[in-house]
């Protein structure tokens, strides 16, 4: 093996490169990123970068000397356009082809859009440039409509509201963040936003964007009413960036379909938002768009590429910051899971909840309780029995720290 | 090695405590990182490097020092 190529130079791609070096790979290493910026961190984009609390440089993942120490052929502003699995080559948008002996795919996801998304004033948020463009619009805008009340939509709404704008969030589901966390937590998130003066229009679909003279003027809802807006943010979720792999022969489903080793084909691995793999801990296939997973999966994929043969079986972790509230979660949150508050009380503004599914604890959620969720995580790791857990009246303070 | 943490960047994920409880803790009130020792013993070096690599806020740095002969 002479050359390892990594496609994607964000958190997962960078971590894969660093892991390969840390683990002793001294051969050629090529890291290819579509964006012109050196690798940066995405979670601050919808928070500190948007509000201006951080300058963009603060989100940079590595200093230039640190990047140089990788001794990698780092190609920024170059996009992979095709993969030849048999011929062991990746084609780039500049026409060049790069040969590889092993490949790691970390191309992430692309935001979903609506028809007429090209109207001025309509934004998505995935890249640093997206965040800076949206920040500029928020600085001059007055009325913002956020379409979609998932994590990104609710974080953007909180940031815009903090900046003093009039903010409305539109969501077809009856409450925000319902898919990840269910109705009860969703209602608490709705309350949090209402308390801060953010308007919510839940349970109603968006029909179309309205515009005049090439600029967006509002968002028309399913009931025929129109919310006037000078800034519209589309937070409709993302699709895995796999179009360049069409026809490559790799299996594409919800992302690059990998086995439990994060392997898509012999010598070809995937990591981060783009990778769908079988997680043996939960016995289910998953694809995660979480910051920590980008790191953990890149480490696992790089290790397996070097011969570890270790199934990637993490307990997922993710978090969201909205106003002064931090929600943290470990595990999975199936829609038909049972949920129970196990520490604190929502009325006090801090609590932890456990989620049970098929007789096991599968998820832990914390609302302003970082130390408690870290301790309770053990229940998910150990697949604690849900029934044994729920017969205990409540967790004594001594059980959590 | 020398360890540096940035409490302003920390997002209280606790990954560092899971990786190296001998070196990291979390503040009681908000879960922000607390460094228990700036210069961890050699046998914890790999765990500390893992903690720095895992930190989802990139709030931990490790300065590797030349070994004195």
Image (cartoon, coloured by chain):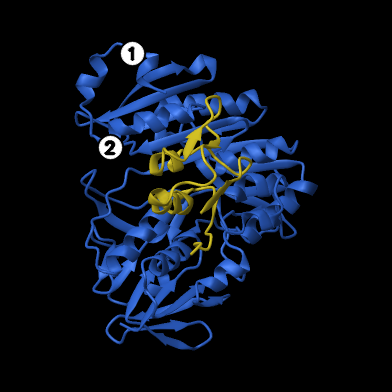
Chain colours: A blue, B yellow
Quarter of the picture holding the N terminus of chain A: bottom left
Helix, strand or loop under label 1: loop
Q: Tell which subunit mark 1 falls on.
A: A
> Residue A82 appears at what percent x and percent y?
40, 80
- Note whether residue A85 is visible: yes
Quarter of the picture holding the C terminus of chain A: top left
Q: Tell which subunit mark 2 falls on.
A: A
Residue at the disc numbered 1: A394
> Residue B20 appears at what percent x and percent y?
41, 42
Asked if A179 appears above or below A371 in the picture, the reply is below
Q: Which mark is residue A266?
A: none
Helix, strand or loop under label 2: helix
> Residue A144 appears at what percent x and percent y?
69, 42
Q: Earlier in the sequence, mark 1 or mark 2?
A: 2
Asked if A296 appears above or below A18 in the picture, the reply is above
Front residue of A23/A256: it is A23
Instruction: Please tell me which residue is depicted at 24% across the width and 34% down the height of the picture.
Output: A382
Task: Kindly give the residue lying farthest to the front in the view shown.
Answer: B69
Instruction: Please tell me which residue is depicted at 51% across the width and 37% down the height of the picture.
Output: B36
Q: CA distance from mark 1 to mark 2?
A: 20 Å
Front residue of A62/A259: it is A62
Asked if B48 appears above or below B8 in the picture, the reply is below
Instruction: Please tell me which residue is depicted at 62% across the width and 55% down the height of the picture.
Output: A59
Asked if A109 appears above or below A369 in the picture, the reply is below
Front residue of A331/A235: it is A331
Residue at the disc numbered 2: A381
Instruction: Please tell me which residue is depicted at 40% across the width and 33% down the height of the picture.
Output: A374
> Is residue A289 found left or right of A132 in the rendered image?
left
């Amino acid at each position: 093996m002479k050359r390892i190529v990594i496609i994607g130079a964000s958190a997962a791609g960078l971590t894969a490169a660093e892991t390969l070096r840390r683990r002793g790979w001294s051969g050629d290493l090529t890291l290819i990123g579509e964006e012109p910026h050196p690798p940066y961190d995405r979670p601050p984009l919808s928070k500190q970068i948007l509000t201006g609390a951080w300058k963009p440089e603060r989100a940079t993942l590595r200093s230039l000397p640190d990047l140089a120490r990788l001794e990698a052929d780092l190609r920024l502003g170059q996009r992979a356009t095709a993969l030849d699995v048999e011929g062991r080559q990746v084609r780039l948008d500049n026409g060049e082809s790069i040969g590889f002996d092993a490949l790691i795919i970390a191309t992430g996801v692309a935001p979903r859009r609506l028809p007429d998304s090209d109207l001025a004033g309509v934004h998505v948020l995935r890249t640093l440039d997206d965040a800076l463009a949206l920040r500029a619009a928020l600085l001059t805008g007055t009325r913002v409509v956020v379409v979609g009340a998932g994590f990104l939509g609710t974080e953007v709404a909180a940031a815009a509201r903090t900046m003093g704008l009039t903010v409305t969030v539109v969501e077809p589901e009856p409450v925000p963040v319902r898919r990840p966390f269910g109705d009860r937590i969703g209602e608490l998130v709705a309350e949090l936003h209402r308390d801060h003066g953010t308007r919510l229009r839940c349970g109603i679909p968006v029909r179309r964007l309205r515009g005049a003279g090439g600029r967006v003027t509002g968002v028309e809802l399913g009931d025929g009413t129109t919310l006037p807006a000078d800034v519209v943010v589309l937070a409709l979720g993302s699709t895995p960036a796999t179009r360049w792999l069409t026809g490559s022969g790799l299996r594409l489903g919800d992302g690059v379909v990998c086995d439990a080793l994060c392997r898509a084909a012999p010598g070809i691995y995937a990591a981060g938002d783009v990778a769908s793999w079988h997680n043996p801990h939960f016995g289910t296939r998953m694809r995660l768009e979480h910051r920590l997973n980008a790191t953990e999966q890149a480490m696992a994929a790089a290790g397996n590429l070097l011969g570890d043969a270790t199934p990637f079986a993490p307990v997922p972790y993710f978090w969201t910051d909205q106003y002064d509230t931090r929600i943290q979660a470990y595990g999975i949150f199936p829609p038909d899971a049972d949920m129970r508050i196990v520490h604190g009380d929502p009325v006090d503004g801090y609590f932890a909840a456990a989620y049970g599914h098929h007789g096991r604890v599968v998820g832990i959620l914390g609302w302003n309780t970082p130390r408690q969720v870290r301790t309770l995580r053990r229940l998910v790791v150990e697949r604690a029995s849900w029934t044994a857990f729920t017969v205990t009246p409540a967790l004594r303070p001594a059980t959590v720290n | 090695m020398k360890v540096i943490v940035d409490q302003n960047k920390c997002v209280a994920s606790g990954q560092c405590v899971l990786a190296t409880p001998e070196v990291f803790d979390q503040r009681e009130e908000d879960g922000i990182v607390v460094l228990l020792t700036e210069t961890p013993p050699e046998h914890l070096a790999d765990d500390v490097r893992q903690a720095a690599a895992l930190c989802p806020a990139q709030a931990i740095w490790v300065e590797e020092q030349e070994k004195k002969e």
